[in-house]
Image: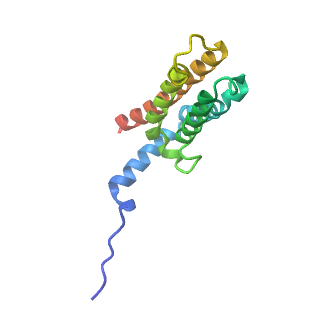
Amino acid sequence: MAERTVPGIEEHPDILALRALSERAATTRTAQICEGLGLLAGLYLAASAWIVGFDATLPTLAVTNLIAGLAYAFLMSGGFGSAFERTHAMSWAAAGIGVWTVIAPFVVSGARSSHPAAEIVSNAVVGGLAFVFAVTTGMLGLRARRMT
């Protein structure tokens, strides 16, 4: 009697269709630019405490920015290129990190009466840009899904 082979889940037609849809969404020039700029924003966020110079005065915020920046860069790059065609699905979590970046100086540093302006401006700008890059990437994925 011949043995019957069953294809794995990775060969399921629905999985293949979703993967093709994700690839179409991520291969646009806009998506690639947003993901690349998002990666740079995450790396800047990770190093911003040392670039701007508040690592000594606010070490807790420096560590928070380092962790958030690395996580953002990882999410926006799809695991540093391992799943480039499916990055837009992770961009919604990256948008949350962008929002967190804007409010982090006030949450993490406690009840300080004054914050260094450079710290607030740095976090607000990079957080806003990170949010825009992540939402744009996510919307490109949703738009591709609606087109089919």
96 or 113: nearer the viewer:
113
Farthest left residue in view? 1
Please provide percent x and percent y for residue 22. 44, 44
77 or 125: nearer the viewer:
125
In the rendered image, the quadrant that contains the N terminus is bottom left
Please provide percent x and percent y for residue 99. 48, 24
Left or right of 52: which side holds 38? left
93 or 100: nearer the viewer:
100
Left or right of 146: which side holds 81? right
Please provide percent x and percent y for residue 72. 55, 36
Identified at 71% across, 29% down, the residue is 50
Against 27, residue 132 (above or below) is: above
The quadrant holding residue 115 is: top right
Please provide percent x and percent y for residue 97. 50, 31
Against 121, residue 15 (above or below) is: below
Identified at 59% across, 23% down, the residue is 126
Counting every numbered tag in the picture gives 0
Q: How is the image coloured?
A: rainbow
The quadrant holding residue 123 is: top right
In the rendered image, the quadrant that contains the C terminus is top left
